[in-house]
Amino acid sequence: MKSRILGGELTVSSVGFGAMGFSEFYGKADDSHSLEVLNAAVDMGITFFDTADFYGNGHNEALLGRFLAELPTAQRQKLQIATKCGIERVHGTGYERRINSSPDYIKRCCEGSLKRLGVECIDLFYLHRVNLETPIEESVSCLKELVQAGKIRHIGLCEVSATTLIKANNVHPITALQTEYSFWTRDIEDNILPAALELGIGVVPYSPLGRGFLSGKYRSNDCFQDDDFRKMNPRFSSNNLSHNTGLLDILLPLAEKYGCTLAQLSLAWLLAQDSGIVPIPGTKQLAYLQENVAAVDIQLEERDLNYLNETGRNFSIQGARYTDEGMKGINA
């Protein structure tokens, strides 16, 4: 496994692992199997693991805590764990949420995350979403205090605008911006990505495979069970998905050329955008995990990269990436 550096300081594997799906949104949780996949990820060289207090209402962090506790000390010390706070569940469960960026809330969440993860210091602590009713300067000042107290090592932000990112970085260096970024979600390329790269902030794309769409395996809304959040996601509605599959036709010839899967090509494309980009695909399947890890060795020729950059931008994706509830706090 190759490595990359986020924000000039945090060295991580070139591909990380997003653990959200182990707890909710993509079917039922199976902790025993999830622990097997996590251990396999370590064996394959992944050192960067991503979770959040929101995922499974604390379940995901607790699962990561179990995983870390079972590792030998030397192996554990090679890993970097990222978690997040900032999204409150309105009724404790369900999809309805409230965005909270207040300092008191951040401190409470940090203590809860430390306990569930079973660690003394969190490697990378993000604001999961930002509510600008609390000035971003106040939120980041609180995070800075947590760094000084030795509770977190690095500060991250998720899904913020370029303006917010710049304001935050003026208070304390931001190590990483986590945001949705993939071959079918390229909004950040206009303003946010250039701002992050100019500031030397690492970019951590979540859903780098378009929630599975870029694997080419989901061409019908009927593929999803009722407890899969994609079932009601606008981009995966029957009409929109039928149109959006046209994007796969751009990828197919090059996947054949490089002898790789659509998913691997999609990850290779992301990795080729900048050395400060570290995608965090998640999966429950060992075969897909191996596939994702192998993508780091695919080197796209410049002409093919240029073709994908231009042709992909000219394809108009239909459907919002979340429902209105899910869009709360996006690009604040």
Image (tube, helix red, strand yellow):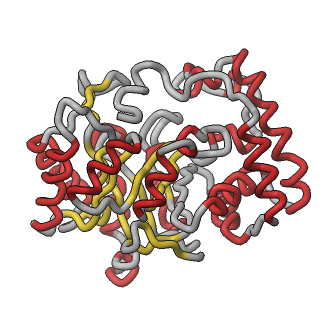
Say whether residue 195 is left or right of residue 54. right
Seen from the viewer's position, the closer of residues 119 and 257 is 257
Residue 263 spot, x, y in % from top left: 72, 51
Q: Give the quadrant of the C terminus.
A: top left
Residue 85 spot, x, y in % from top left: 26, 44
Seen from the viewer's position, the closer of residues 34 and 204 is 204
Q: Residue furthest bottom?
A: 74
Residue at image location 37% in from the left, 74% down from the top: 9
Seen from the viewer's position, the closer of residues 128 and 77 is 128
Total marks drawn?
A: 0
Whether residue 66 is visible to the viewer of this picture, yes or no, is no
30 above or below 75?
above
Which quadrant of the view contains residue 255?
A: bottom right
Residue at image location 74% in from the left, 28% down from the top: 244
Residue 259 spot, x, y in % from top left: 87, 61
Q: Give the quadrant of the N terminus.
A: bottom right
Say whether residue 73 is left or right of residue 319. left
107 above or below 1?
above
Whether residue 229 is visible to the viewer of this picture, yes or no, is yes
47 above or below 75?
above
Residue 13 spot, x, y in % from top left: 51, 71
Say whether residue 154 is left or right of residue 19. left
Q: Residue furthest top?
A: 239
Residue at image location 14% in from the left, 69% down from the top: 150
Residue at image location 43% in from the left, 74% down from the top: 11
